[in-house]
Amino acid sequence: MLPIRALLLAALRAAALKPLAGRVALVTGASRGIGKGIALELGAAGATVYCAARSSRATGLSDDRPVADAVGELSVERTAELVTEAGGRGVSVPCDCNDENAIEGVIELIRRDEGRLDVVVPSAFATPPTLADASFRDDFWKQGMQMWDCCHGVGLRGTYATLLKATPLLIETAQAHEVRPLACLISSFGGQAYTFNVAYGVGKAATDRLARDAAAQLSKHNVDTVSLYPGVVATEGNLEIEARGEWAAASGGLDLSKAETPQFSGRALVALLANPGYCQANSGSFQVVAELASELGFTDLDGSRAASIRSLQYLVPNFLLTDAKIAALPAWQRGAARTFRDEYTPDYLLPWSVFSGGPPPEA
């Protein structure tokens, strides 16, 4: 029989490995991309994760691309299985996140089966299937209304509907369990500076405002909100664009080989949930995944920490001193420019007032 001290140490180690044991989360858009990455990391931290998305073995896999052969099946069922394999409990819920009645049904399922909801992550997003990937960056008057309807339908309306339907259960959880539930909205740097196209930026700015204004009403109920900013992410969709040779045109020349994994955003959320005081103090704010990594002490899957998009360590190699721009310099300047870029560029964060002052430089 183990001594009491050994049992206590074992219990403490188990709690450290699964800090979210007993917590319940809802992640929409969980069949792929950032939503899937977040679901997996919540599971690795011990949470019960309801994985909601359209892509399902029961209703059909939507928008599957050839890259799925390399990354595996993109369905809510598969994500739920991976959540369980990671150490949590995954529950798959086929759901069209553009339908508020379907979302309400998911919330009622969680209420009935779990009686609590600690985390909601509206991550579902869609882009027009009829547009080429390169035209995602096109002038707004050439894109038609389909870009607006996608970014502001599933992306914004779906986020609002999910938060609206989930909030009563979040409040009940705060009251019954003396915890601070968190609504984590998935935004991007497009909420602060021109990114991709007009409709996209307007939608992300609205997502940030939703987090901020919702916090004004939810704070008295001990529920927090945050708007999360991933960087460039190696999602299945982006990997597929790269495989087709279209990534440079679609991204403006960014280096996908140095992109964040979807799980990096998940680790950011786990770190936030482990620091409820931080969430309370910063409720309603937008938080950059890469900057949280430095502040709260976590890394990506390979142990690295990507530079924030507003850091000189990101801006210099991707825009100011690219390989192409260095090659265009006089021969005697190239070595010094490359050395400065690779070895001496500081991790200096541009103030938001500067970063948001206009579009990024062309690569």
Image (cartoon, rainbow, N blue to C red):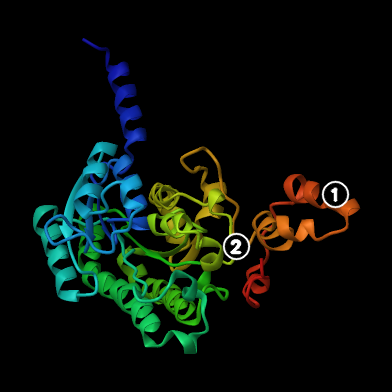
Question: Is residue 295 visible to the viewer in this orientation of the structure?
Answer: no
| Nearer-the-camera pick, 128 or 91 | 128
Type of the residue with mark 2: Gly
Asked if the residue at tag 2 contacts the one at tag 1, i.e. Cβ–Cβ closer than 8 Å, the answer is no
128 over 282 or under it: above or below = below
Q: Position of residue 309 (x, y in %)?
A: 59, 60
From the image, which quarter does the N terminus lie in?
top left
Question: Is residue 213 visible to the viewer in this orientation of the structure?
Answer: yes
Outermost residue on the left side: it is 112
**Picture disc at residue 137:** none
- Residue at 37% of width from left, 56% of height from top? 33
Q: Which residue is mark 2?
A: 253
At label 1, counting other C-alpha atoms closer than 10 Å, the crowd grade (few under 14, some 14-19, many 20 or more) is: few
At label 2, counting other C-alpha atoms closer than 10 Å, the crowd grade (few under 14, some 14-19, many 20 or more) is: some
Q: Which residue is mark 1?
A: 336
Q: Position of residue 206 (x, y in %)?
A: 43, 78
Question: Does label 1 or label 2 sit earlier along the sequence?
Answer: 2
Q: Is residue 344 left or right of residue 137?
A: right
Outermost residue on the bottom side: it is 141
165 over 243 or under it: above or below = below
